[in-house]
């Protein structure tokens, strides 16, 4: 009875929105769960120490200089930073000492360490001319153990982000001292040529047995800020949990009414704007004010940079306004950037400036970096909900969430140095459908931006499509099948010079002006509305010609 009263008291504040509590039989009794707190973290040079004899024979200063110079390679985790190499002369031996106490994600004891991995980037001579070895120190026997050597790795072949594991059946805990020291050594064998490295780090994995008292279903729902409908998430013990119902809503309130999923609310009836086949458009993400008399029924503009008054001006001129934001990346210049926890865009233990999650070559000195997000995390969805609520408040008719194909980029990354998110196609479908559902709950239309491989699975959830370069890559056919044939607009952008510097000699539309297929056959007038930009800059005064 006490638990029911506690739930009711927390719900009293929500009576205005029509909240009813969880049924008593649905509330989970607290229980003690046995679990393991497993994890992995990279210890970088900043927390490693060098010993006095470490630098003996190092041609350029040995480990101490390597430690300082490794931070200078900021162009990417897998780049070949030749200028930052440290050369180690023949017969060189030196080691770094890493400490468990420098871990920030957990505090395992030496006995709880389950894996040690040496992370290195190097280039050097083949074993015929010389050799070098990486070793870890086994404290239980006071001896060094070979982890790997240069044999078979090629002669002066750049080897990026190599992960060296302890050989089987070595026990990782034996390589950690009672005070938490871990030693990594480079041994440069005799020969006439030098070895060169630009990184040497250590990844520590652990398994900490612990117990946890699971929260009730009511507490789980309350912590996630929900009071109706089914909700899934991670409970206080780190376990996946789904609660079938966090409560019901009293009429006239409905679950998700007012635009917030899984919360009771009463929203006014609305109709999501339609974007039928043949609708014309203009795309400008750089100007915060563009002429109202352009030959376009739809204006696509930046959500953050476009003032509410300007959006209203466009609408008064008879335009539908679509507001752009990135739903798949963290942009450090946006006004809500501080709402993203670091672990949503940079793997714990990573050097974020060299993260594998950095999007392309977008990082610039002095700011302007963009990272792929782990959109499975609730914190990401919380920010995206706020962005769509901002779009509604500003008067946008629809939204264009960009970068909604992170799973395909995640698959392209070689994750031997730091962990990828491990996003799957199923994760992406779930996230993209959630974006569409949330937009519709706010009476906003929503565009499917790119993500060509999932068009067939997502078309029913989206109101229209925006694509970049489907004509250049002959990928427009799916849009005709799944969007235009269902009377949904397809907006296409092509570039004479794209962001990668590739030039495509677009001069005029292929076929007749009425057909305006600009690169693919079997389109009729209005199937595909194409804008061709002179450069990769998306702005209305950068257009080379337009296929209306």
Image (cartoon, rainbow, N blue to C red):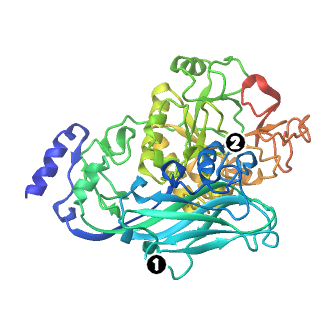
> Which image quarter is the N terminus in?
bottom left
Observer-nearest of 432 and 518 = 432
- SS at badge 2: loop
Observer-nearest of 64 and 435 = 64
Q: What residue is rendered at 41% in x and 59% in y?
A: 100
Crowd tier of the residue under label 1, counting other residues whose Cα lies within 10 Å: few below 14, some 14–19, many 20 or above: few
Q: Is residue 403 visible?
A: no
Left or right: 321 as drawn, with respect to 97: right
Residue 229 x, y percent position in the rendering: 32, 54
Residue 403 x, y percent position in the rendering: 62, 45
Left or right: 469 as drawn, with respect to 365: right
Q: Quadrant of residue 123?
A: bottom right
- SS at badge 1: loop
Q: What residue is rendered at 60% in x and 37% in y?
A: 369
Q: Are marks 1 and 2 in contact (CB under 8 Å)?
A: no
Left or right: 137 as drawn, with respect to 238: right
Up the image or down, 289 lies above or below 489; here it is above
In the image as oriented, which residue stretches furthest toward the bottom? Answer: 169
Q: Is residue 178 visible?
A: yes
Left or right: 25 as drawn, with respect to 455: left
Question: Label 1 belongs to which residue?
Answer: 141
Distance (Cα) linking label 1 and label 2: 47 Å
Residue 157 x, y percent position in the rendering: 79, 62
In the image as oriented, which residue stretches furthest toward the left? Answer: 1
Disc 1 or disc 2, which is closer to the eye?
1
Q: What residue is rendered at 35% in x and 41% in y?
A: 257
Up the image or down, 174 lies above or below 336; here it is below
Observer-nearest of 373 and 481 = 373
Q: What residue is rendered at 36% in x and 67% in y?
A: 178
Question: Label 2 belongs to which residue?
Answer: 361
Specify which label sits upstream in the sequence, 1 or 2: 1
């Amino acid at each position: 009875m006490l638990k029911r009263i506690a739930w009711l008291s927390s719900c009293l504040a929500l009576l205005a929105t029509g909240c009813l509590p969880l049924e008593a039989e649905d509330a989970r009794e607290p229980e003690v769960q046995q679990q393991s707190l497993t994890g992995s973290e990279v210890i970088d040079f900043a927390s490693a120490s060098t010993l006095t004899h470490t630098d003996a024979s190092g041609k350029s200063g040995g480990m101490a200089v390597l430690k300082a110079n490794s931070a200078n390679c900021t162009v990417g985790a897998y780049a070949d930073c030749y200028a930052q190499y440290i050369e180690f002369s023949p017969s060189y031996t030196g080691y770094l000492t890493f400490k468990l106490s420098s871990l920030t994600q957990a505090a395992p004891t030496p006995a709880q360490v389950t894996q040690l991995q040496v992370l290195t980037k190097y280039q050097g001579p083949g074993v015929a001319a010389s050799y070098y070895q990486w070793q870890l120190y086994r404290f239980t026997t006071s001896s060094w153990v070979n982890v790997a050597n240069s044999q078979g790795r090629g002669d002066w072949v750049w080897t990026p982000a190599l992960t060296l594991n302890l050989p089987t059946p070595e026990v990782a805990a034996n390589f950690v001292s009672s005070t938490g020291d871990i030693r990594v050594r480079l041994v440069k064998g005799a020969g006439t040529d030098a070895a060169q490295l630009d990184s040497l780090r250590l990844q520590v994995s652990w398994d900490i047995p612990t117990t946890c008292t699971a929260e009730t279903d009511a507490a789980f729902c309350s912590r996630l800020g929900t009071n109706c409908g089914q909700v899934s998430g991670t409970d206080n013990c780190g376990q996946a949990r789904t609660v079938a119902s966090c409560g019901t809503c009293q009429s006239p309130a409905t679950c998700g009414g007012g635009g917030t999923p899984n919360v009771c609310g009463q929203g006014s009836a609305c109709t999501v704007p339609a974007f039928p086949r043949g609708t014309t458009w203009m795309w400008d993400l750089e100007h915060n004010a563009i002429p109202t008399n352009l030959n376009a029924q739809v204006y696509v503009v930046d959500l953050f940079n476009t003032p509410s008054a300007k959006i209203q001006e466009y609408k008064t001129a008879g335009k539908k306004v679509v507001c752009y934001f990135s739903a798949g990346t963290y942009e450090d210049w946006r006004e809500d950037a501080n709402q993203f926890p670091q672990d949503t865009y940079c793997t714990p233990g990573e050097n974020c400036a060299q993260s594998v999650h950095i999007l392309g070559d977008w990082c610039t000195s002095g700011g302007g970096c963009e990272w792929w997000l782990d959109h499975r995390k609730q914190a990401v969805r919380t920010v995206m909900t706020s962005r769509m609520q901002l779009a509604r408040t500003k008067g946008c008719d629809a939204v264009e969430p960009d970068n909604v194909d992170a799973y395909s980029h995640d698959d392209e990354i070689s994750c031997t140095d730091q962990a990828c998110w491990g996003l799957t196609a199923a994760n992406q479908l779930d996230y993209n459908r959630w974006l569409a559902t949330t937009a519709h709950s706010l009476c906003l239309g929503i565009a499917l931006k790119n993500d060509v491989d999932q068009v067939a699975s997502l078309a029913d959830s989206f109101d229209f499509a925006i694509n970049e370069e489907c004509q250049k890559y002959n990928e427009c056919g799916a849009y005709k099948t799944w969007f235009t044939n269902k009377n949904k607009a397809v907006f296409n952008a092509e570039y004479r010079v794209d962001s990668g510097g590739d030039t495509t000699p677009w001069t005029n539309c292929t076929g007749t002006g009425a057909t305006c297929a600009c690169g693919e056959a079997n389109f009729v007038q209005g199937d595909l509305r194409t804008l061709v930009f002179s450069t990769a800059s998306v702005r209305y005064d950068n257009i080379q010609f337009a296929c209306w």
